[in-house]
Amino acid sequence: MSAEERRTVCHRDCPDACGIIATVEDGRVTKLSGDPAHPLTRGFLCHRTNHFLKTQYSPARLTTPLLKRRGAFEPISWDAALELAAERLLDTRAKHGAVSIFHYLSGGNVGMLSCLTPYFFSLFGPVTTKRGNICDGAGLEAQVRDFGVSDSVEIEELLHARSILLWGKNVVVSSPHLVPLLREARARGTSLTLIDPLWQETAKLCHEQVQPRPGGDFALAMAVAGLLFE
């Protein structure tokens, strides 16, 4: 059977849904490469996704549920695992109430589970959930307080900015898909500034880096806020 190329997107929980061209042979993905037609990533794939197939087809990858018995993990069927989870949940709800169950969900490679699990626990509960977020909660709350809604403009709008401030953000490592856009913005005349106590590769993209003492960026942020209010 000849190889076939299929266009898809990355499964990771990044905001850009990087385009992927997957080479499929006999029902098995044998190669991943960036999709040059993707408007943002333009053929780029991060290190993790470039090496994803090593994990996907690793002999050490878990492919079945495991249950710990007598100090050792034993494989069980999916039906048995679901039955056990249902039994434990129902038993806990009956004995202690649904609020005794803590439903914790954050980011990661969650896919549709991020929509289905809250729906399930809203019908099963109400259960206890977390308040806030260990990841982007502060940024989302800032957007709500500033604009009344947690919503962002298209990332391509950065090309029309007169000034871009990267505050503690190492885009070369954490948002490499943003690098070509920042370079293009700079070429158009946009001013780029980085605020970070440490020197990092992102500084090479910027006209200036402000390096407050570690922990001193809070005072800097309050000073900036004070000037804005004035």
Image (cartoon, rainbow, N blue to C red):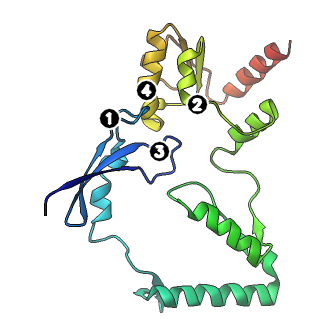
Q: Nearer the viewer, residue 68 or 102?
A: 102
Measured in 3D between alpha carbons, the distance from the residue under mark 1 to the one under mark 3, in whole angstroms, is 13 Å
SS class, disc 3: loop
- Circle on res. 36: 1
SS class, disc 4: helix
Point 61% across, 28% down: residue: 214
Q: Nearer the viewer, residue 175 or 60?
A: 175
Q: Which residue is mark 4?
A: 179
Q: Nearer the viewer, residue 214 or 27?
A: 27
Q: Residues within 10 Å of mark 1 (few under 14, many from 20)?
A: some
| Residue furthest right as drawn | 230
Identify the amino acid type marked 4.
Answer: Val
Q: Is residue 132 left or right of residue 66?
A: right
Quadrant where the C terminus sits is top right
Measured in 3D between alpha carbons, the distance from the residue under mark 3 to the one under mark 4, in whole angstroms, is 16 Å
Q: Which badge, 2 or 4, is on the more N-terminal residue?
A: 2
Point 38% across, 74% down: residue: 62
Residue 135 percent across, percent down from the top left: 62, 47
Residue 202 percent across, percent down from the top left: 45, 24
Q: Residues within 10 Å of mark 2 (few under 14, many from 20)?
A: few
Residue 137 percent across, percent down from the top left: 69, 45
Q: Nearer the viewer, mark 3 or mark 4?
A: 3
Q: Is residue 221 above or below residue 14?
A: above
Q: Which residue is mark 2?
A: 154
Measured in 3D between alpha carbons, the distance from the residue under mark 2 to the one under mark 4, in whole angstroms, is 16 Å
SS class, disc 1: loop
Residue 46 percent across, percent down from the top left: 36, 41
Q: Which residue is mark 3?
A: 17
Point 50% across, 57% down: residue: 109
Quadrant where the N terminus sits is bottom left
